[in-house]
Amino acid sequence: MIVNIKEAKTEQEAKIANNLLTKLVNYESELDRNIRKDFIVKDFYEKKLDEKNCIAIAYNEKREAIGFLYGYIQKYNAKYNAIGFIDAIYIEETYRNNDIATNLLSYFKEWTKTKGGKEIELNVLNNNDIAFEAYKKLGFNITKYTMSQKI
């Protein structure tokens, strides 16, 4: 399968990313009780079209958007190296297991390097076994835990 990765630069491309993020949110609503199932993302990525953010969209040979990755550089303070943080990654279900996530990840790694980043991080819901296994296969290791408590 031929996949073209293109960084979003226009409002139309940002709208494509919003649509894909909506699909990710709806998928994750099945895994996290705090996520509203009917949530629709509007006007989010339009505000992120700058050099501080990477919105990479994967297109198939028909130029249909089949996945995306959104990330940015995170700098905690001068003591820590810059980290490329992946905030969202989604692949349309019919296109999964075709190395699209690998291609998006490669694109983001190169983008992160140009911004001075030395490593990349992401968060995954603890019960998203499919994503967890995919990230391990892509070379990610557990380095932190996030814990929560109902109040």
Image: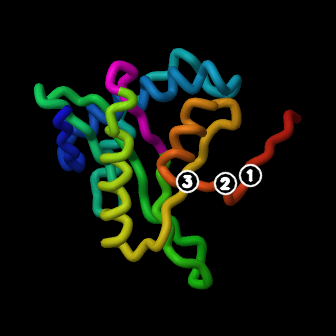
Gap between marks 2 and 1, in whole Å?
A: 8 Å
Circle 1: element type: loop
Residue at the image point whose x is 39% and y is 47% from the top: 70
Label 2 packing within 10 angstroms: few (<14), some (14-19), many (20+) = few
Nearer the observer: mark 2 or 1; the answer is 2
Q: Is residue 20 left or right of residue 37?
A: left
Which label lies toward us, 3 or 1? 3
Element marked by disc 3: loop
Name the quadrant of the C terminus: top right
In percent of width and height, residue 45 lies at: 35, 42
In this image, 139 relative to 58: left or right? right
Task: State the mark number for residue 128.
Answer: none
Residue range highlighted in magenta: 88-95
Amino acid type, residue under disc 1 in the picture: Tyr
Q: Are circles 2 and 1 on residues that touch, CB within 8 Å?
A: yes
Q: Is residue 104 above or below residue 38?
A: below
Q: Mark 2 = which residue? A: 142
Q: Can you identify the residue that label 3 sits on?
A: 140
Q: Is residue 64 magenta?
A: no
User: Residue flagged by tag 3: what amino acid is it?
Assistant: Phe
Q: Residues within 10 Å of mark 1 (few under 14, many from 20)?
A: few
Q: How crowded is mark 3: few (under 14 residues within 10 Å), some or many (20 or more)?
A: some
Residue 97: x and y in percent read 39, 30
CB contact under 8 Å: marks 3 and 2: yes
Residue behind mark 1: 145
